[in-house]
Amino acid sequence: MDPGAGAGQQRARGRLGAPSSGARAPGTPWARFSAWLECVCVVTFDLELGQALELVYPSDFQLTDKEKSSICYLSFPDSHSGCLGDTQFSFRIRQCGGQRRPGHVGEKRSDSWAPVSLQREPAHFFGYVYFRQVKDSSMKRGYFQKSLVLLSRLPFVRLFQALLGLVAPEFFDKLAPCLEAVCNEIDQWPAPAPGQTLNLPIMGVVLQVHIPLRADTPEPGPPKQSSHETLLPAPVVLPSVHELDLFRCFRPVLAHVQLLWELMLLGEPLLVLAPSPAVSSEMVLALTSCLQPLKFCCDYRPYFTIHDSEFKEFTTRTQAPPNVVLGVTNPFFIKTLQHWPHILRVGEPKMSGDLPKQVKLKKPSRLKTLDTKPGLYTAYTAHLHRDKALLRRLLKGLQKKRPSDVQTAVLRRHLLELTQSFIIPLEHYMASLMPLQKGIVPWKTPPQIRPFRQDDFLLSLERAGPQLTCVLKGDWLGLYRRFFKSPHFDGWYRQRHREMTQKLEALHLEAICEANIEIWMKDKSEVEVVDLILKLRERLVRAQGHQLPVTEATLTRARLYIDTAIGSLPKDLQAILGPP
């Protein structure tokens, strides 16, 4: 397959694309395009080679042979799915060979303002697929089979699905010229800046999207069109760039949504066996979105096949199952991964007005490798009692024919409040470890953040635990103890410690800028003055890169202090320390 993929890419290079740089810095060819997408791929079925990469655009975008192979296999449903017609799904692959396109300053700044769950993936690609399989007597196999794939580092599944819904049907009719025009249009889009409502023209349609800001409420609602701007044609307003219809995804497992939330919180390995890549990828993405606003720190694969380069890594029995949520459609995985502690088998989605039959909780010993019935196969016992009021409310909504987006809002709000109730005590305890501001003095090293002591935190729960904001009863202490061993605690703690360290450095810089530098310098040696200059410059660089939360006035004063300090030194040192 790889030789064919390589040949396909060589053909693509001859047909399409202008030269573009690897880093895509602002002002270079395809810089705006690469703020949204890495590249667009076309995968076709070759009678001799199987799935083959027919086209990559821009044509100079570099993919390793392993990445090409993964994209080819993951862009087609496997033979167990039997998908006829058009189907959309998504996958996520590990980037090979290190980071080839380092993000420029604008991207890093955008990420610092974005919610943690929507920041760019530095080491993974998302693939958004539109696959078409239709009968065609002119083809040797009697079928037309082709996939259009958008490769991106952004987890904007709702936006890219909408984009594919517009572009793919047109592309399958007109092929390469249509794709080139679309990519040129995307290269005119404004950057996906957090907090902005953007109008994105594509093929005569304007998609209007709101890019969430970290400070936004988690459900900002549909974007509002600017009053001073009248667009013709009227824009297609997307309510979210990333949120799926959670109620539709979770319909067969609503009775176990809280248990699944616990499994996600604890970073437990979970296999999702679904009838198609569409159901598989949506279920995995829905599960990993359960923890918002907490970042999902484990690996996850919305759609995974036996051909994936990481198949051996994930299926080995020589060590404990990895912390990954794996979406598959091939029943072979039931046999291969029957040692995994949690397996969710879901059937074909039924969109009738009634609540579909809920999958049952079953012991792993009930797992049959050949004919596994839908169910959640696990020996895990939930720490928290089930919220029966939530299920009653959703059932009532079904009886009243409440729209799915309203049901989704109810479900998402429940999960959000559950996560917040769990995280708020951790946030309060973490904040108590921050040194007092009065201990931060200008000319001394700032005090350290005190260590996180798990026993002290657990004792604090008696007076400031989740019971203050959540009515659910259960073994909260046991849940926290297991959480401490999970990748999500490590990810949360590292992020909060980094933010607190930056805040500490910013407060120290402000303290220096409010002090009188000339009085300080009176009895200081040249070495001490030079040391201060170098430290202030290092802080300035970090602050200008938006890594320190300081005001522009503080930055201006810091520059002035640097100039004053340099001016106090002998001429030879001034020449060395002059403007960098």
Image (spheres, rainbow, N blue to C red):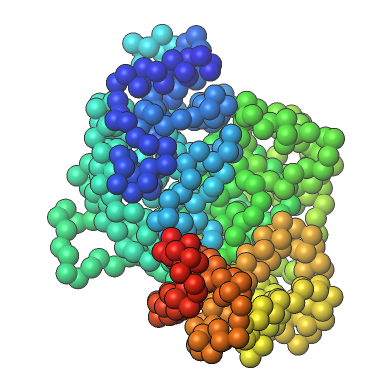
Determine which quarter of the picture holds residue 485: bottom right
Q: Along the line of sight, which residue is nearer the eye, 353 or 87? A: 87
On the rendered structure, is 187 left or right of 243? left
Q: Along the line of sight, which residue is nearer the eye, 530 or 193? A: 530
Residue at the (76%, 87%) spot, across then down: 463
Residue at the (25%, 42%) spot, across then down: 185
Single out the residue that lies furthest toward the front: 571
Q: Along the line of sight, which residue is nearer the eye, 99 or 279? A: 99
Give the answer, above or below, for where 75 lies relative to 448.
Answer: above
Q: Position of residue 120 (x, y in %)?
A: 49, 51
Give the answer, above or below, for where 446 lies relative to 220.
Answer: below
Q: Along the line of sight, which residue is nearer the eye, 408 or 397? A: 408
* Quadrant (top left, top right, bottom left, bottom right) of the C terminus: bottom left
Q: Is residue 259 visible?
A: no
On the rendered structure, is 565 left or right of 417? left
Q: Is residue 63 visible?
A: yes
Q: Position of residue 142 (x, y in %)?
A: 41, 13
Q: Position of residue 371 (x, y in %)?
A: 72, 32
Residue at the (63%, 91%) spot, across then down: 438
Give the answer, above or below, for where 174 lies relative to 270.
Answer: above
Determine which quarter of the picture holds residue 317: top right
Q: Position of residue 126 (x, y in %)?
A: 50, 42
Determine which quarter of the picture holds residue 501: bottom right
- Give the total number of marks visible in the rendering: 0
Give the answer, above or below, for where 575 lies relative to 445.
Answer: above
Residue at the (41%, 8%) spot, across then down: 140
On the rendered structure, is 410 left or right of 202? right
